[in-house]
Amino acid sequence: MEQQNNEYKDEINLYDYWKIIAKRKILIIGLFIVIVVSTAIGSFRMPNIYRGVACLLVILKSEVITAKEITDLIGKIDYEKRQSIVPKSYPNVKNIKFSAIKNSKEDSKNKFVVTIDAKKIDDIPGALSEVVVYLNNIDIIKSAVSRDKAILLRQSAELSDLIKSSPDLLAAYNKLFSAGKLTTVGFNPVEVNKKIVEIKVDLLSIEQYLSRLNNGGIEIAAQPYVSSRPVSPKILRNIALAGISSLLLGIFLAFFIEYIGNIKNKKS
């Protein structure tokens, strides 16, 4: 019997709640319409934001700083820092974010990701170029590049001298060999020529690396991805959230007004 009474009371309470909602339905519906329409208008008036994502590579031989340390060094980018990073593109660039690649592979420590949000797709490549220039002007990067270039230039000079002297050296060996003054033990012309080719390949590799370092110690690792569709505003999501929030707010106000009215009635 007691259980039936409790169920009956619950039904009464639910019915009372429903009566309050029905009584204030104009308030709830009106608030819902106003907030949803306002949100929709605001969302449609907001500028489209497009996103570009690029992987950057630290090409320094001397591992003075890793990609993660670079992202930690830069930190969070506020308006003033964004303006200094992309001075030409900053009016249309709304956000820049650096993040390290969370990967256990060895080569991942030299790579990190930059994400650029801008009003126009065409602004993203230019902003990315400015980001790379900014990174390469960081003092620790510039000093590491200078140090690596000095080492490579010295190696290049040594290899160049070795290549220049190799024809004379090989000719001298051949002359001694032809004269019978040099045994075949420890001397193989094919191996000598092969070694000269290897030295030339090493020199070419050094020259190519020097050419890359002339542009800085950080470069774009691959073709950046730029979204063809805007990442914001998310109009449907904004409208849905506004609709749910307005309904909850309307119901809360309905009960609050009813509560205030009951208090006034009791006092009177």
Image (cartoon, grey):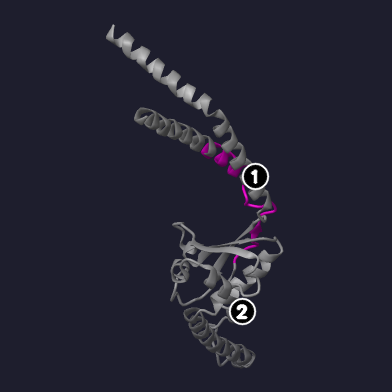
Residue type indicated by callout 2: Asn
Quadrant of the snapshot with the N terminus: top left
One can see residue 156 in this view: yes
Looking at the image, do the residues carrying marks 1 and 2 touch, with CB atoms under 8 Å apart?
no
Query: What label sits on residue 40 in the rendered view?
Result: 1
**Disc 1 element:** helix
In the rendered image, the residue lying farthest to the right is 122
Q: Residue at x 46, y 58 (%)?
A: 105
Task: Give the left or right position of residue 20, taking residue 211 as reference.
Answer: left
Q: Residue at x 54, y 83 (%)?
A: 187
Magenta-drawn segment: 221-245
Quadrant of the snapshot with the C terminus: top left
Magenta segment: does it hold 177?
Answer: no
Vertical position of residue 1 compared to residue 46: above or below: above
- Closest to the observer: 116 or 208? 116
Q: Quadrant of residue 195?
A: bottom right
x, y (%) of residue 31? Answer: 57, 38
- Closest to the observer: 212 or 156? 212
Q: Residues within 10 Å of mark 1 (few under 14, many from 20)?
A: some
Task: Give the left or right position of residue 19, taking residue 94 as reference.
Answer: left
Q: Residue at x 57, y 86 (%)?
A: 156
x, y (%) of residue 190? Answer: 61, 78
Which residue does the numbered mark 2 point to in the structure image?
A: 215
- Closest to the observer: 88 or 71? 88
